Amino acid sequence: LALYSKILINGQPSYEISITDRGLQYGDGLFETIAICGGKAVLYKLHLKRLEVGCRRLAVPVPRREVLDKEVINLCRGISRGVLKIIVTRGSGGRGYRPPSQPQSTRILSIHPWPDYPSVFAEQGVALRICCTPLGHNPSLAGIKHLNRLEQVLARSEWNDPMIPEGLMLDSQEQAIAGTMSNLFIAQKGSLQTPDLSRCGVAGVMREFILGQASALGVKVAVRSLTLADIKRAEELFVCNSLIGLWPVRYLEETQYPLGSLTQRLRYLIHTQLSLV
Amino acid sequence: LALYSKILINGQPSYEISITDRGLQYGDGLFETIAICGGKAVLYKLHLKRLEVGCRRLAVPVPRREVLDKEVINLCRGISRGVLKIIVTRGSGGRGYRPPSQPQSTRILSIHPWPDYPSVFAEQGVALRICCTPLGHNPSLAGIKHLNRLEQVLARSEWNDPMIPEGLMLDSQEQAIAGTMSNLFIAQKGSLQTPDLSRCGVAGVMREFILGQASALGVKVAVRSLTLADIKRAEELFVCNSLIGLWPVRYLEETQYPLGSLTQRLRYLIHTQLSLV
């Protein structure tokens, strides 16, 4: 519990929830993992937007904005560098899988230490493996950051090498979807492409931010199906999430990539704008 | 909390777990729902076997048999009719999705009231709907009763009619897989067929029991792919789980089925052997 210096459950300091909570019983809820920098939640509005979209998709009551804002400000105050995790579950009740007709959501906010990834990952890039655990298709769950994350847990259990900080996940049709904890982009002839996430995968907030930044820079972006072969023959490859910002990918198993110019430009832009490293 | 008259968490009476538990964070665990009859857990050995298979598949430490036995006996004592739920999670720790190298599993045993389904469901049969929420394929998770159950929650949220106690779930290829909380069988010319669950679905303990009973009775059983069309033209259809035993299906939306002889024979056998109704 040393990790949890600060936790609020429905606004009260606590570190336990009832075992009846549907978050535990069925993974019936959503979460956000947010960088804290200089006492503030980075890209907070984009995170809230995704959380709200997820709640609406699952018909989980959306936490009141002003309540959440107040708790986030209080928890993040004085934290120069850290991580805020927000979990929203459907709460307790219902009969078996069937949700209660008037669910009362559970809201868990917790502060965690900043992950200590070597800075060389962001500066020089990383090596990725290709995971064996596939991502199953389910349009009703695709895109949102729900609590059913066993596929990612199994994929991340496949290897132990600390020099390989991420793995690429495919669906059963050899489409490249995402990293276990990140989204991916390829650069090709000065434009960007990122996998379509309408059947599986989590639509990351950093992915959203990069899509916006790229458009603002006049860089073309396509969201489309990308096969493993497309990824392998890409000129540049990078992964991103809210905590790591952007990591250039230098190796995908045997395939090698340069530290490309578009990747570096975007990385510089993200890391300076968001003060992530 | 009125529902929870008796709970043991890692052997201690309690009703709360740490929010760091991976069961909540990622649905990283498994569960069993077991009928209690006359102070005893019904089909306990089959439940334990499935739990153990699930733990091994997810690399979650299997709870020690003698510890579990003792807790189950203590909790079920004096309960003439009830439900025992066992949850085993990977416990706390690890880094993000990555499991800890030495996980300490969390074991949650809880007693719940017997569900009050009308007896007419078992005696005369039920009406089923066809759910829109598909079951995604994932061979690494198929068959086991893990805690990632959002597909079932969404499917069970699709309707509200108390006269329709169950819904049929299909995969994206229109293969019939299971009910939201049950397995299904069709009877055709005196033999049984039940869907293959190697890509999705939960391999229920009652399904396992029925497969065994049918063989003992000399009834042929095939585990195979069944399309929705196969189900619709079946002579008899029934669903089963550990609490309901067997419910004949009389309607699948517009398709009508008789109260068939093989279904009735199996129902009689299950309900008398296991004293479920």
Image (cartoon, coloured by chain):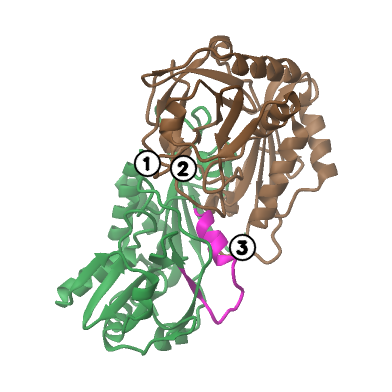
Chain colours: A brown, B green
Residue A150 within the segment the image draws in magenta: no
Task: Work out how far the residue at label 1 is from the one at label 2, CA to CA, in angstroms.
Answer: 9 Å
Q: Nearer the viewer, residue B112 or A67?
A: A67
Instruction: Judge from the rendering whether residue B233 lies leftward or rightward of residue A14; answer left or right.
Output: left
Position of B14 relative to A42 (above/below): below
Q: Secondary structure at mark 3?
A: loop
Task: Work out how far the residue at label 1 is from the one at label 3, CA to CA, in angstroms.
Answer: 27 Å
Residue tagged 3: A99
Which segment is the magenta one? B149-168
Residue tagged 2: A150
Instruction: Judge from the rendering whether residue B273 lies leftward or rightward of residue A68; answer left or right.
Output: left
The answer for which chain carries disc 3 is A
Q: Secondary structure at mark 1?
A: helix
Position of A221 relative to B269 (above/below): above
Q: Position of residue A201 (x, y in %)?
A: 53, 41
Instruction: Judge from the rendering whether residue B30 lies leftward or rightward of residue B206; answer left or right.
Output: right
Residue tagged 1: B58
Amino acid under disc 2: Leu
Q: Callout 1: few (<14), some (14-19), or many (20+) C-alpha neighbours within 10 Å?
A: many
Q: Secondary structure at mark 2?
A: helix
Q: Position of residue A9 (x, y in %)?
A: 70, 42
Amino acid under disc 1: Leu
